[in-house]
Image (cartoon, rainbow, N blue to C red):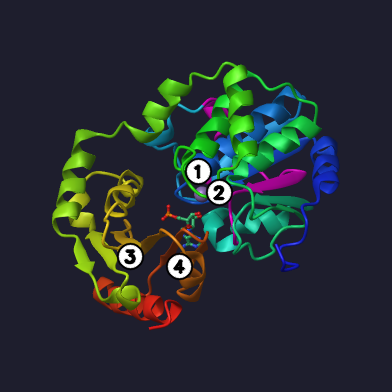
Amino acid sequence: MTSSYPPAPDWSGAVTALRQAESVLLIAHVLPDADALGSSLALGMALRSLGKDVTVSVGDPGFTVPDSLNFLPGLDLVVPPEDVVIPDLVVVCDTSSPERLGVLAESVSAAPISVAIDHHPTFNGFGTIHVIDPESPATAALVLKLIDMLDVPLNREIASAIYAGLATDTGSFKFQSTTSETLRTAARLFDAGIPHSELARKLFDDEPFAALKVLGIALSRAVLVQGAVAGRGLVYTTVGCDDRGELPELAMERVIESIRRTHEAEVAAVFKQSDTGVWKGSLRSKTDINVGEIARSLGGGGHKFAAGYTGTTDVDQMVIDLIDALDRAAGA
Ligand code: AMP
Ligand code: MN
Ligand code: MN
């Protein structure tokens, strides 16, 4: 990194804070993915083994663990945000800004010390101690380093939660962020006895039939805008509340994985309507378009090749604004 922001990870500050705290609340970002929740649970289990009073929560009102992540170990640590008590220390995992903490955003400022552990280049500096490394393929990899520094042995449960985050955020070790060190980390997790094949199936190859039917609807209405991104192509689709019926918002997270396979498009977008009616955009790029910067310009954030934002208009206007932003980024 040539830029001086984010600052170098404060490993020793974080380890000292974790050792000293008697009660710790770990928070993952709203609509948590396997990296956010897996990282929180892994560190939560490690801290519990050190005798600390640990809870894990997510700031979606009334949060309960989604079916798609209900196989993760350590879920007995999870409490709904309404039951959160301000602890000695708050640890925030995989979250680039306080808005992504939902109803728990205030808990971070209410705690005397707060550690942010994250790998988003768009991290905006909240919390008192920062362990931020945009080069890290997943927050889970940073959490494993902290667990090692705390001298907590890597058991099968902790390793499984770390694997969930690492495998998800690297797209099964396929994305550019995967390095030989990532694979050595994965080898350590295998050596700890994780059920890797079962975990991978549950993470990537297991969806309710109803979600596949919605995927079919989304794919059939996908649009290829060949002239967008200065001629390099945008493919997008939409999933409204009416399309998904009883299915939760999180059941739509995988639609982007199918859409982004489009050969003719450098950028893929899925617009998903949340339960409140607001539309959210998920963006993916393939080579050199930085969708993290584009999402940031549209009020969200993320990584170079994977990013997201929440819209402030109807979905038709969001498509127009996205095409404008992409053309500008591509120098059209
Ligand atoms: P998604 O498309 O929802 O899987 O998100 C892709 C990446 O963008 C993830 O790393 C998210 O953390 C990030 N991201 C998604 N939505 C937002 C948002 N509203 N604000 C900031 N970052 C976001
Ligand atoms: Mn995440
Ligand atoms: Mn992540």
Q: What stretch of residues is rendered in magenta?
A: 73-97
Q: Is mark 1 within 8 Å of ligand 3?
A: no
Q: Residue 290 magenta-drawn?
A: no
SS of the residue under disc 4:
loop
| Side of 307 where 134 appears, left or right | right
Vertical placement of residue 302 versus 233, above or below: above
The mark found on residue 279 in the picture is: 3
Q: Nearer the viewer, residue 247 or 182?
A: 182
Q: Is mark 3 within 8 Å of ligand 1?
A: no
Query: Which mark's residue is nearer the viewer, 4 or 1?
Result: 4
Sequence order check, earlier mark of 3 and 1: 1
In whole angstroms, how far apart are the C-alphas of marks 2 and 1? Answer: 7 Å
Residue 110 picture location, percent across and down: 71, 56
Query: Which mark's residue is nearer the viewer, 3 or 2?
Result: 2
Residue 130 picture location, percent across and down: 74, 54
Q: Are marks 4 and 1 in contact (CB under 8 Å)?
A: no
**Can you identify the residue that label 2 sits on?**
177
Residue 297 picture location, percent across and down: 49, 76
Amino acid type of the residue that numbered disc 3 sits on in the rendered structure? Trp
